[in-house]
Image (cartoon, rainbow, N blue to C red):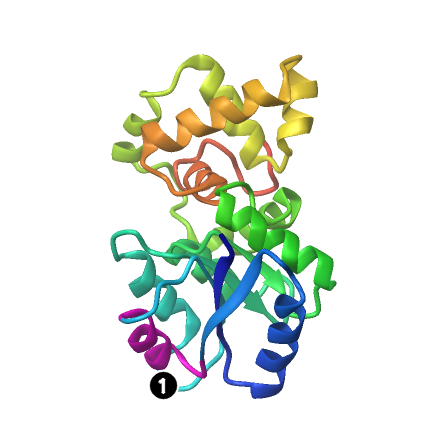
Amino acid sequence: MSIRVMLVDDQVLLRTGFRMVLAAQPDMEVVAEAGDGVEALEVLRSTAVDVVLMDVRMPKLDGVEATRRICSQPDAPKVLILTTFDLDEYAFSGLKAGASGFMLKDVPPAELLGAIRSVHSGDAVVAPSTTRRLLDRFSPMLPSTGREPERKELGRLTEREREVMMLVAQGLSNGEIAARLVLSEATVKTHVGRILTKLGLRDRVQVVVLAYETGLVRAGGGAAG
């Protein structure tokens, strides 16, 4: 079954370019388009979508608020934020709103396609190091100290799961974590899955956000003492 993709961007030319790239893939189809957040929400009421490629700067309703509303719905499609500038504060806000990751608009087509497939399968959708740099840049927006209720949430994790969570938040991929802890990559993926389930998170991007919010990892990527 094809991955059903929706393009949300106020620039028609960009949507056309993305549509041409996706149309050439045997496992993808563009099932809907919208020029702003309001139109996107309206279209999603009647169209089944797996992955939304969401611009952030749009008239009427920006991509961040549109993402928040989409992700608050049951069985919501995954949202991949598209931003013009690396380390854009809008991308950070998008992650906080529930997006599964972000990509630059000038990303090579192969990377965009890979990201869409990763989002659809529930795997990591942005380079962990990129996510870390984004959070480091905007860490002042986060609480300066860990919030006690969320620190208690971390008590649900085993010692190994907590260790894996810290490494995810520091920007390591599953393969790098496996090498660091002398585990198989499959075992690391299992740990990440359990972390998501126990903490009620959608994906590893939210693991990174929570690790920063609770003070488990400090700005700069280091583990908290």
Q: Position of residue 9 (x, y in %)?
A: 51, 79
Q: Is residue 89 visible?
A: no
Q: Position of residue 126 (x, y in %)?
A: 60, 49
Q: Nearer the viewer, residue 176 or 151?
A: 176
Residue at x-position 62% and y-position 29% = 174
Amino acid found under the numbered disc labelled 1: Lys
Chief secondary structure of the magenta portion: helix
Quarter holding residue 43? bottom left
- Drawn side of residue 93 relative to residue 118, left or right: left
Q: Is residue 18 above or below residue 69?
A: below
Q: Is residue 217 above or below residue 51?
A: above
Q: Position of residue 15 (x, y in %)?
A: 57, 79
Residue at x-position 41% and y-position 81% = 36
Identify the magenta region.
34-45
- Drawn side of residue 147 relative to residue 216, left or right: left
The residue indicated by pointer 1 is 60
Q: Is residue 186 above or below residue 121?
A: above
Q: Nearer the viewer, residue 159 or 137?
A: 159
Q: Exactly how many numbered labels are in the figure?
A: 1
Q: Nearer the viewer, residue 201 or 185?
A: 185
Q: Circle 1 sits in a helix, a strand or a loop, which is it?
A: loop
- Drawn side of residue 109 relative to residue 134, left or right: right
User: In the rendered structure, does residue 154 fall within the stretch colored magenta?
Assistant: no
Q: Badge 1: few (under 14), some or many (20 or more) residues near its Cα, within 10 Å?
A: few
Q: Nearer the viewer, residue 114 or 209?
A: 114
Q: Is residue 174 visible?
A: yes
Q: Position of residue 61 (x, y in %)?
A: 36, 79
Quarter holding residue 182? top right
User: In the rendered structure, does residue 37 fall within the stretch colored magenta?
Assistant: yes
Residue at x-position 72% and y-position 57% = 110
Residue at x-position 41% and y-position 68% = 64
